[in-house]
Amino acid sequence: MTNVKKISRLPTIYSDVYIPLGIKCKPAYWLEYCGLRKFSLPFDWVGHYKLDVVIDTLNNPNKEWFVDFIEEDSKSNFYHHIKDNKTQMTSIHHFPKKYSVKEYLPIFNKMFLRRKIRLCNSIKNNQNICFIMNRNDSVKEISKFMFSLSKMYPKNHFIVINIRQDNKNNCINKYEFSRSLVLYDYLFNDVHEKGQDETKNKDCWKGNTKFWLGLMGNLKFGRNNKIRKYF
């Protein structure tokens, strides 16, 4: 039975590794900014993928991405903006415009195979894993993801901290699905202090700076993290 309760503040979290899981690059940025992301993983800078894609990647790290893709309009002078037709995953930071997408795709997949294997090892070689998300997925969808992880890695403890945009509420719902599966679903107004108009504020994508810095301050590394084994 799921134990659900509202809490006023996030407790100090001790984890062996922190893994960003989108839905865009904000969680990866803040983890790196605060010294909690020590290496590159496959989902750091891609967007709009479902959590099922994460499970599929853990089961099949050799499976290539963007086999069937479309190229969308890009505002960048440096990178193509592409979308995977099957998973809806998007990339706006990985395919340089000095190459065609098809020309660069083998380089991308070789690089991302290393990152996928690193992701698998980072979970396999540690016990306490914390995922940081910024998603609109339902609690049911997130719990399904967590139970899938638990079946794959039954000896691990998994925590998910999901930041959910809410203009009216500021609260944390704690869902304890089991002793080893805990979700903190955090609702608050995640808007940058200079506004969210990207034409006027280039940092709008970073969200509520004060909140994210406060959140990162509650995240600590456990004593047993085995970073060196990832490489």
Image (tube, rainbow, N blue to C red):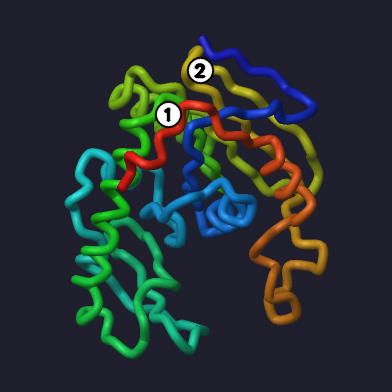
State which quadrant residue 122 falls in. Answer: top left
Q: Is residue 67 above or below residue 190?
A: below
Residue 164 image position (x, y, % from top left): 64, 44
Residue type indicated by callout 1: Met
Query: Going from the N terminus, do you reach mark 2 or mark 1 first?
Result: 1
Residue type indicated by callout 2: Phe
For this rendering, which residue is in front, 125 or 112? Answer: 125
Q: Is residue 53 above or below residue 126?
A: below
Residue drawn at x 59%, y 50% as measured from the top left: 35
Q: Which mark is residue 146?
A: 1
Residue 215 image position (x, y, % from top left): 70, 41
Q: Callout 1: helix, strand or loop?
A: helix
Residue drawn at x 68%, y 37% as measured from the top left: 186
State which quadrant residue 111 falls in. Answer: bottom left
Q: Which mark is residue 96?
A: none
In space, the residues marked 2 and 1 are separated at their CA atoms by 9 Å
Q: Callout 2: helix, strand or loop?
A: strand
Residue under numbered circle 2: 177
Residue 4 image position (x, y, % from top left): 63, 17
For this rendering, which residue is in front, 142 or 219? Answer: 219
**Badge 1 local density, few (<14 within 10 Å), some, or many (20+)?**
many
Residue drawn at x 69%, y 70% as measured from the top left: 203
